[in-house]
């Protein structure tokens, strides 16, 4: 048994299972799942894409609404991953548990790390940001590569290639490849939307009263930012120095809004809002989504289009 729970007995309920006679695809987190879902055509039905000619069993390993940084797979999950056809994970420190699994994964499994599909950036400690302490590893990459729609296009194409590699039928291969390009067309439109918003904005600074998983996004669109914590911080309670810095930053630059991310407790944002009058807005990183959003079929593009509206409200 490779992993043990932090407290109590291991929950042996598998999050993912293998289905005989189907193309078994396991994605660890929502962006990977959503990109694969587009390649299967499932999330493109309203564009006229028909059902996949190849039966696909696509599953998301980490449950909707779960805290990703604390996730541990069950022994049954590990067995399923080792025997699936395509395994998509993010890469980086948060996925260190994956390395043990990959040592014994089936040689027939196509493995994709999203961080291998793009040019990565190091996690950044900005002025005023609370650091994790001595245990924090210098030079660690920022794992949130999908937050840039341009990066997302590269990841989608890599996933589409993996699907193509798993079929010997030219028509089936074309189906997966075309779906990947269709979704990339939507992502390209999303990229243009953000470019237009930033180009016409009155300001270019964002303040996050939260973790900051948007380094690739802000770099893509030349936005500046200040935040309480880096993207994968374990801490969620800032010290007084960080709180004071963010309050002073909002006041001194007359910033009208402070941001939180999805699944946040919003305590720090509420504190800053009370002291400055800034409104609280959410910018969704797509790291994970709620159960309701998952069941309704919400996509990365849906969420990012909403982010575009929120960004316009904050910058105009």
Image (cartoon, rainbow, N blue to C red):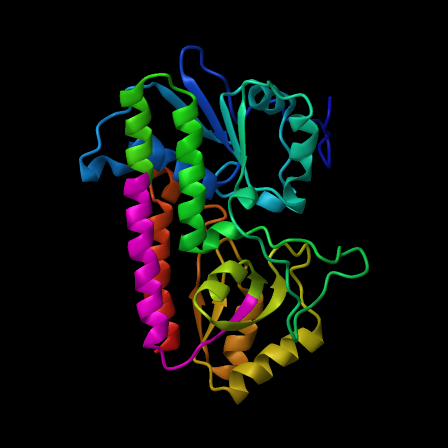
Placement of the N terminus among the 4 image quadrants: top right
Residue shown at 78% from the left, 61% from the top: 133
Q: Is residue 287 left or right of residue 8?
A: left
Residue shown at 33% from the left, 33% from the top: 177
Q: Is residue 291 visible?
A: no
In the rendered image, the vertical position of residue 7 relative to residue 293, given as above or below:
above
**Position in image of residue 116 (x %, y %):** 56, 43
**Position in image of residue 11 (x %, y %):** 63, 26
Can you tell which quarter of the image residue 55 is in? top left
Can you tell which quarter of the image residue 290 is in? top left
Q: Dominant secondary structure of the magenta stretch?
A: helix
**Position in image of residue 39 (x %, y %):** 35, 34
Q: Is residue 71 left or right of residue 266?
A: right
Q: Judge whether residue 201 is colored magenta.
A: yes
Can you tell which quarter of the image residue 103 is in? top right
Which residue is outermost to the right? 134
Q: Which residues are magenta?
A: 181-209
Nearer to the camera, 298 or 141 = 141
In the rendered image, the vertical position of residue 305 relative to residue 276, given as above or below:
above
Nearer to the camera, 240 or 97 = 97
In the rendered image, the vertical position of residue 304 relative to residue 298, given as above or below:
below
Q: Judge whether residue 125 is colored magenta.
A: no
């Amino acid at each position: 048994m490779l992993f043990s729970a932090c407290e109590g007995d291991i929950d042996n309920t598998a999050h993912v299972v293998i289905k005989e006679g189907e193309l078994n695809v396991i994605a660890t987190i929502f962006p990977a799942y959503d990109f694969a879902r587009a390649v299967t055509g499932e999330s493109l039905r309203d564009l006229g894409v028909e059902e996949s000619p190849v039966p696909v069993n696509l599953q998301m390993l980490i449950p909707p609404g779960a805290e990703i940084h604390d996730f541990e797979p069950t022994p049954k999950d590990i067995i399923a991953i080792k025997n699936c056809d395509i395994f998509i994970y993010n890469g980086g420190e948060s996925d260190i548990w994956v390395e043990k699994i990959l040592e014994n994964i089936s040689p027939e499994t196509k493995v994709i790390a999203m961080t291998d599909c793009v040019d990565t950036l190091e996690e950044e400690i900005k002025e005023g940001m609370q650091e994790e302490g001595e245990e924090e590893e210098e030079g660690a990459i920022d794992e949130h590569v999908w937050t840039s729609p341009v990066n997302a296009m590269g990841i989608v194409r890599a996933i589409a290639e993996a699907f193509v590699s798993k079929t010997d039928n030219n028509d089936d291969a074309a189906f997966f490849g075309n779906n990947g390009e269709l979704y990339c067309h939507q992502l390209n439109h999303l990229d243009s939307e953000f470019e237009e918003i930033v180009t016409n904005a009155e300001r270019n600074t964002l303040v996050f009263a939260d973790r900051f998983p948007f380094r690739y996004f802000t770099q893509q669109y030349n936005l500046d930012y200040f935040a309480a914590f880096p993207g994968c911080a374990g801490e969620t309670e800032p010290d007084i120095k960080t709180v004071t810095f963010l309050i002073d930053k909002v006041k001194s630059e007359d910033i009208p809004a402070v941001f939180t991310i999805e699944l946040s407790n919003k305590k720090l944002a509420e504190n800053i809002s009370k002291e400055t009058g800034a409104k609280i807005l959410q910018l969704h990183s797509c790291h994970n989504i709620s159960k309701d959003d998952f069941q309704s079929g919400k996509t990365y593009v849906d969420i990012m289009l909403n982010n575009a509206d929120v960004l316009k409200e904050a910058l105009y």
